[in-house]
Image (cartoon, grey):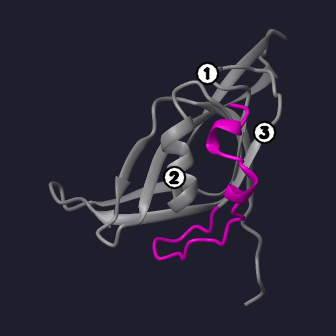
Amino acid sequence: MAKGVNKVLLLGNVGKDPEIRSTPGGTIVASFSLATADRAKDQQGNWQDRTEWHNLVAFNRTAEIVRDYVKKGTQLFIEGKIQTRSWDDKESGQKRYRTEILVNEMSLLGGRGEGSSSGGGGGYSRSNTSSFDQRPAAEPDYTDQGITDDDIPF
């Protein structure tokens, strides 16, 4: 079977504060929703905004950044992939499905404390491989240069 492409790019605002949890193996997981808006003309020729909601999941270091910096209204640029998972509902016995975006890259837009800002100053990116048993990515260590989290401009 030929290799396919599964890539998603989203620019939108977080719908509610993220939910943070840990797996039994200690992996940090952040779950949150992102709203994107599209504009189209209706039958009368008036512009109508249509909001689409996306379920996002981030792991490890990216989940920590979500926990520390993302809240309801935060504007994000996301690169990820679509995954649909299924399970059997314990109460009804029915098969349930959930389609999610697994976050690979995330850029926080706007400044510190500007949750729903539409301006885009500098962004901050973090990579994240999207599986529960991922290994932490090697990250540059700038501590010897005196750079701390307080130097991040948001």
Q: Earlier in the sequence, mark 1 or mark 3?
A: 1
Q: Amino acid at mark 1?
A: Gly
Asked if the magenta segment contains residue 129, the reply would be: yes
To which quarter of the image does residue 140 belong?
bottom right
Give the Cα distance between marks 3 and 2.
17 Å
- Mark 1 neighbour class, 10 Å CA radius: few under 14, some 14 to 19, many 20 or more: few
Residue plotted at (46% across, 71% down): 132
Q: What residue does disc 3 label?
A: 123
From the viewer's perspective, is residue 76 above or below residue 7?
Answer: above
Q: Quadrant of the N terminus?
A: bottom right
For the residue pair 71 and 93, the one nearer the viewer reads as 71
**Label 1: which secondary element:** loop
Query: What secondary structure do most residues of the magenta stretch adopt?
Result: loop
Q: What residue does disc 1 label?
A: 113
Residue plotted at (77% across, 83% down): 3
In contact (CB < 8 Å): disc 2 and disc 1: no
- In the picture, the disc for residue 63 is 2
Question: Disc 2 or disc 1, which is closer to the eye?
Answer: 1
Q: Which residues are magenta?
A: 128-154
Q: Amino acid at mark 3?
A: Gly
Give the Cα distance between marks 2 and 1.
19 Å
Asked if the magenta segment contains residue 134, the reply would be: yes
**Label 2: which secondary element:** helix
Q: Earlier in the sequence, mark 3 or mark 2?
A: 2
Q: Position of residue 97 (x, y in %)?
A: 41, 58
